[in-house]
Image: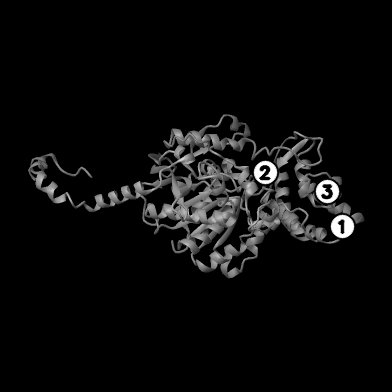
Amino acid sequence: MPLFRTIASLAVLAMLAAPAAAQESGRARPHERAQQGEDRAEAALPQASGIFSLIPPDAVSDHILKPQEGDLAYSATAGTLDLFGQDGSRTARVFYTAYVAKNRSEGRPITFAFNGGPGAASAYLHLGLVGPKILDFSSGPDVGTEPKLTDNPESWLRFTDLVLIDAIGTGWSRAASDDTARGFYGVRQDAEMFSKAITLYVQKNDRLAAPKYLLGESYGGFRAAKVALALKSSQGILVSGIVMASPLTEGRFLANSSDPISAALQLPSLAAAKMDREKTFSPEKLADAERFAMSDYLVALAGAAPQGAAAEAFYGHLSDMTGIAKDEVARSRGFVGDIYAKTMGGADKIVSPYDASHAVPDAYPEDVYSRNDDPILEGYTRAYGATFAAYARRDLGFACDVTYTLINDEVNRRWEWNGRSGGDTRRLASVETDIRDLLSTIPSFRLMIAHGRDDALTPYGVSRYVLDHLPAGLATARTELKTYPGGHMFYTQSAARRAFSEDARRFYQSRLGG
């Protein structure tokens, strides 16, 4: 109870204590009844056992963010949401971290964020982009060996409350058993799980009236569209908007370099990567590459191979644009998607599909195709996992003795894309119809897609293709594509992170009807 009584009233209260106690003995005050109801509900829950018993209770702490516009007090909650089966047994615990502004104004948005994979935890977006702390790699990839967190003055907490959620099998989100976990590893099942977790958080924290946004990276961008539809269809919750970072949008174009359209959509990213590696980038040069990709290049790949002087000019231009040797370009007939990793970076170098401007010594220079661990995904960004576990324990008070799983390859291998598991079925994955449905049925819904221009894995050209093929009546003034220097995790570059954060702030503040 609040301590609102004065000392002077204590004597009166002492005289009234006995009759008051008798009057209240069979009747609890309203707030006490609510608390008792919560206590009974908690007591009725199945007791944690197995892996769940190792996950600590929720931890709540108070902090202050110090952005340029002034101090912002906020509370942080590191905890879990329980999911139950039809028989009442606990099937999973979903780990989340929530950052909520104190003294928030009416209408302040709330954003639910997650990474992708499938099989990646949310620490990437958490410590790389939106959270109040940042693991800054801008001084170089060697920072990964000595990770240090700093304050993040560009945190999205400036303009939205944040709830970062780990998918089952990642971070500290766990299923009751290995067999139970299989039930979460699929496009539909995963979307339903996230929609339930989001709904539980919204209901428990009285945020139904807040504008709700989703932020997803890579497969998380794909997931965001599926979750938005699941929220609408299964939970009756409508989202105001989605921000996709480096998203998978169309599986048929995912590194499908034998397809002329896929190759044409990827080519501008390869051209941008060469310019960024050589520090010769200009928007005009990239625009030229985009025009060439969707005209002469696409036509040449779709038709018969060029011959004679035409072939010399065509392959020579491709070589100049990408930095791949002319004879290698000619040998591939211009389909460079399968060879760029080993041929763009120079002698005995390899580039990452996550950032084709990033070249490192090739561990296997004698092999024709790449065998290298990826220098970004398997390199310095792995530091996010251990850093988040230490941050949660030290700053958030969530001392978990279960290891934090940044990437779970087993989840990826088991994933069901279209009712079936296996990598080839990814090509059936698509969010175009989901985006159309959301734009059509939620008049205020808006979409922002952000990409690093050097990302050869999910190139920005694919997202542009998707947006360009939406009906103008749906897309005009409600969808936008932004590109930044860098690759798939472009936010590891501080300038790109700042620019993206400011663009996101404008996106939120200009919401339709807001």
- Amino acid type of the residue tagged 2 in the rendering: Asp
Q: Of residues 419 and 323, which is closer to you in this image?
A: 419
**Which mark is drawn over residue 305?**
1
Crowding at mark 3 (Cα within 10 Å: few <14, some 14-19, many 20+): many
Residue behind mark 2: 355
* Cβ–Cβ under 8 Å for marks 1 and 3: no
- Residue 84, position as x, y percentages in the image: 46, 52
- In which quadrant of the rendered image does the N terminus lie? top left
- Establish if 283 lies above or below 492: below
The reply, left or right, for residue 352 in relation to residue 216 is right
Indicate the amino acid at tag 1. Ala
Left of 412 or right of it: where is 33?
A: left
Which badge, 2 or 1, comes first in the chain's sequence? 1
- Image position, residue 358 (x, y; %): 69, 40
Q: State the CA–CA distance, disc 2 to disc 3.
A: 20 Å
When the figure is inspected, residue 292 is found, relative to residue 273, above or below; the finding is below
Describe the colour scheme in one phrase: one colour
Position of residue 174 measured from the top left corner of the image (x, y, whole percent): 51, 44
Query: Is residue 168 at least partly visible in the picture?
Result: yes
Quickly name the residue at label 3.
Answer: 329
Name the residue furthest front. Answer: 87
Residue 68 locus on image (x, y percent): 44, 42
Question: Judging from the image, what secondary structure is the residue with disc 1 in?
Answer: loop
Label 1 vs label 3: CA separation? 12 Å
**Label located before the other in sequence (2 or 3):** 3
Alpha carbons under labels 2 and 1: distance apart:
29 Å
Horizontal relation, residue 191 to residue 9: left or right: right
Going 58% across and 63% down the picture, which residue do you hit? 434
